[in-house]
C-alpha cells in the first residue's frame, strides 16, 4: 500500500521537486516501510515525537520539523534536525541560532508565510519578512541558514483560490530571492503542497511537497 502510494505520487514529480513524507502520529515501523521504498525525508510536528523517532530509526533520515515550533522545544531537536519549515518570528529564529551554536551546527530554516484565508494558520506577512531578515543580518545569526519559504493554502475545494495562494507564495519567494538572496544558491526552497493540493503546488513552482495521509492513511489522534 505505502510503496504503491509513494510510487504513484513521486512518478509525477518534476526533477526539482522532493517529497517530505509527513509521518506525524505514525509509529516507527510504518516509517520504516517508507524508508525501505527509498524515502529519506520525513516531516514531524511535535518535538518529543520527533526526538524519539530520531533515536529509534536509521541515522541517514533527514528529519524536517513542519509545524508550529515553540521556542522552548528548539533545544530538543537542534542536535539533528535537517530543516525547520515553520519559522515565523525573529524570536524563534534567534532561539534556533543559539541552540544551533551550542551544537556547533548551522540549521537550515524556511520562513513560513500566511497565505491562507483562515486566520488560524501561522505565518509571516510579507512586510514582516523584511524586518526579520534585516535583524537576522544585523545581529549576525550565522548559525541559521534561511533557505526558502513555506506556506499552507486554505482548506477548500476552490482550486482557483488555492492556485492564487500558492502563486502568491512563489512571488514572495522570487521577491526575497532578488532582494536578499541573489548570491545565495541555498535559498532555493518553496515548501508548499499537501495531500489535497500538491498537484496545484507543483504547477505553481513548489520544490518540497509535504504529504502525509495519501501515503500513510488517515491519522488517528485518539
Ligand atoms: C500534517 C501536515 C501536512 C501533511 O498533511 P496531509 O494532508 O496528511 O498530507 C503537511 N504540512 C503540514 C505543515 C502539516 O502539519
Image (cartoon, rainbow, N blue to C red):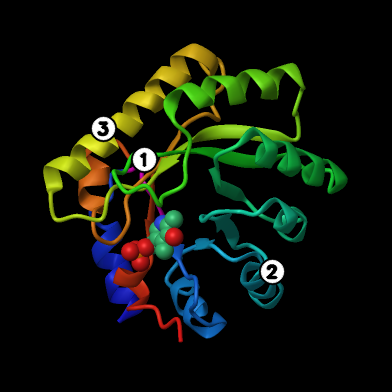
Residue shown at 24% from the left, 65% from the top: 8
Quadrant of the rendering where the N terminus is positioned: bottom left
Mark closest to the chain's N terminus, 3 or 2:
2
Q: Disc 1 marks which residue?
A: 16
Place of residue 204 in the rendered image (x, y in percent of width and height, measured from the top left) = 24, 36
Quarter assignment of residue 138: top right
Q: Which residue is mark 3?
A: 167
Residue sitting at x 61%, y 53%:
69
Indicate the position of residue 115 as horizontal and vertical percent values. 34, 39
Label 3, residues with CA under 10 Å away: few <14, some 14-19, many ≥20: some
**Residue 51 — which label?**
2
Dots 1, 2 in contact, CB < 8 A? no
Tell me the residue at 54%/54% (across/down). Answer: 68
The quarter holding residue 96 reads: top right
From the viewer's perspective, is 183 left or right of 137? left
Q: Is residue 162 above or below residue 175?
A: below
* Front of the two marks 1 and 2: 2
Residue 16: say if magenta: yes
Question: Which of the pair 90/110 is nearer the observer?
Answer: 90
Mark pair 3, 2: CA separation: 34 Å
Of the image marks 1 and 2, the number of the one nearer the N terminus: 1
Vertical comparison of 141 with 221: above or below: above
Alpha carbon separation for disc pair 1 and 2: 29 Å
Q: Is residue 79 above or below residue 87?
A: below
Amino acid at each position: 500500500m505505502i510503496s504503491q502510494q509513494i510510487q504513484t505520487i513521486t512518478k509525477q514529480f518534476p526533477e526539482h521537486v522532493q517529497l517530505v513524507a509527513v509521518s506525524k502520529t505514525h509509529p516507527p515501523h510504518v516509517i520504516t516501510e517508507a524508508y525501505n521504498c527509498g524515502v529519506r525525508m520525513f516531516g514531524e510536528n511535535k518535538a518529543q515525537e520527533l526526538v524519539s523517532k530520531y533515536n529509534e530509526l536509521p541515522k541517514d533520515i533527514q528529519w524536517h520539523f513542519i509545524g508550529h515550533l515553540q521556542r522552548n522545544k528548539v533545544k530538543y531537536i537542534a542536535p539533528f534536525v535537517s530543516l525547520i519549515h515553520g519559522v515565523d518570528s525573529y524570536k524563534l529564529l534567534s532561539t534556533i541560532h543559539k541552540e544551533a551554536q551550542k551544537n556547533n551546527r548551522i540549521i537550515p530554516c524556511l520562513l513560513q508565510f500566511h497565505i491562507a484565508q483562515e486566520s488560524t494558520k501561522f505565518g509571516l506577512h510579507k512586510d514582516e519578512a523584511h524586518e526579520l531578515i534585516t535583524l537576522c543580518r544585523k545581529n549576525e545569526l550565522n548559525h541559521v541558514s534561511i533557505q526558502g519559504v513555506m506556506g499552507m493554502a486554505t482548506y477548500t475545494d476552490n482550486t482557483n483560490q488555492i492556485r492564487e495562494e500558492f502563486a502568491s507564495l512563489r512571488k514572495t519567494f522570487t521577491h526575497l530571492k532578488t532582494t536578499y538572496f541573489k548570491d545565495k544558491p541555498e535559498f532555493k526552497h518553496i515548501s508548499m503542497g499537501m495531500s489535497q493540493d500538491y498537484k496545484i503546488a507543483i504547477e505553481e513552482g513548489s520544490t518540497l511537497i509535504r504529504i502525509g495521509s495519501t501515503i500513510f492513511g488517515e491519522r488517528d489522534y485518539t
